[in-house]
Image (cartoon, grey):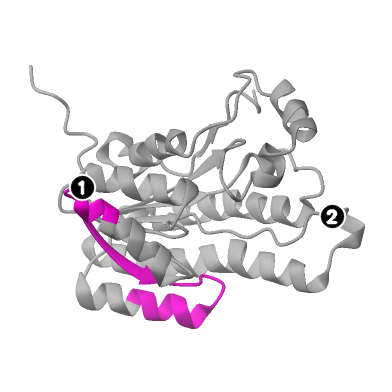
């Protein structure tokens, strides 16, 4: 009996934003292990290059491209480079995000509000638009938006961040409906509490962590690698009839 090829990404080109560490790095490594040529991207080239070099050293294919998704010019530049170098894009993983301010919603700083919206909503939107244009040309593609359980249940003192992640879930459904005719699928991943630098304020504080764990049926924090398998499913032919979905990977928090 032969093994399934449903998760095979040989010959595919995948762009992963925020891939220099954490969940993005784990996703980039797994997609490369499954045969994709992974474009490792984040704001700083050095971090991207380190991950790309590690993938190549393990026998995979990877290219580092710096791109701050809060800057439309950088998005346009990155996709111009992808078009020139690869001529196609099969998978986009929108993972880069920001949460510059933990505070009561009444104390929200206008600058922090704008930065969060620019990256988490506008950035995801125009990354998806540019990726979608390339995918439309080849007649297929998969866009995966990394949102958060905060999209469903707002995190304490994370009001603006939670609002933007709710917008990402709706955005996912918009692209799923309007891009299906081009063979493009769009789905969202909603990670629960994961051990990353992004969540370090929660994970490293015992009092906060204990409260969080009391609400998670599996009673533990996720490793970044535990988010990557769900993305592989959404990126591959295994999910060929799946679009517009918000997939919770949260240890049961939202159940």
Q: Is residue 149 left or right of residue 39?
A: right
Q: Is residue 126 above or below residue 198?
A: below
Q: Residue 67: say if magenta.
A: yes
Q: Residues within 10 Å of mark 1 (few under 14, many from 20)?
A: few
Query: What residue did someone put label 1 on?
Result: 58
Q: Nearer the viewer, residue 127 or 196?
A: 196
- Is residue 163 visible in the rendered image? The answer is yes
* Image point (22%, 62%), residue name: 138
Q: Which residue is mark 2?
A: 103
Residue 56 picture quarter? bottom left
Highlighted range, magenta: 54-79
Q: Secondary structure at mark 1?
A: loop
Image quarter (top left, top right, bottom left or bottom right) of the C terminus: top right
Asked if residue 241 shows in the view, the reply is no
Residue sitting at 35 percent across and 70 percent down?
65
Q: Which mark is residue 30?
A: none
Q: Is residue 169 left or right of residue 22?
A: right
| Label 2: how many Cα within 10 Å (few below 14, some 14–19, many 20+) | some
Q: Disc 2 on helix, strand or loop?
A: loop
> At which x and y percent is residue 160?
75, 57
Residue 208 sits above or below residue 219 on the image:
below
* Quarter that holds the N terminus: top left
Q: Residue furthest left?
A: 1
Residue appearing at x 24%, y 43% in the figure: 33
Q: Pinpoint residue 235: horizontal percent, then vertical percent.
A: 33, 45
C-alpha distance separating marks 1 and 2: 42 Å
Tell how many labels.
2
Q: Position of residue 95 (x, y in %)?
A: 49, 54
């Amino acid at each position: 009996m032969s093994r399934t090829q449903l998760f095979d990404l040989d010959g595919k080109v995948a762009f992963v934003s925020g891939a220099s560490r954490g969940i993005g790095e784990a996703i980039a490594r797994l997609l490369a292990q499954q045969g994709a040529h992974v474009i490792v991207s984040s704001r700083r080239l050095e971090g991207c290059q380190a991950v790309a070099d590690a993938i190549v050293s393990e026998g995979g294919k990877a290219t580092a491209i710096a791109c701050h998704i809060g800057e439309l010019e950088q998005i346009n530049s990155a996709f111009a480079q992808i078009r020139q170098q690869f001529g196609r894009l099969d998978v986009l993983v929108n993972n880069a995000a920001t949460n510059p301010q933990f505070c009561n919603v009444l104390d929200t700083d206008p600058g922090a509000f704008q930065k969060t919206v620019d990256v988490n909503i506008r950035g995801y939107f125009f990354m998806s638009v540019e990726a979608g244009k390339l995918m439309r040309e080849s007649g297929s593609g998969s866009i995966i938006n990394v949102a958060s359980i905060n999209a469903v249940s707002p995190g304490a003192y994370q009001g603006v961040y939670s609002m933007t992640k709710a917008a990402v879930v709706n955005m996912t459904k918009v692209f799923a409906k309007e891009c299906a005719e081009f063979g493009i699928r769009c789905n969202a991943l909603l990670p629960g509490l994961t051990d990353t630098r992004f969540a370090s304020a929660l994970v490293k504080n015992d009092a906060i962590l204990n409260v969080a764990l009391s609400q998670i049926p599996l009673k533990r924090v996720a490793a970044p690698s535990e988010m990557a398998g769900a993305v592989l499913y959404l990126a591959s032919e295994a999910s060929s009839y799946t679009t517009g979905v918000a997939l919770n990977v949260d240890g049961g928090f939202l159940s």
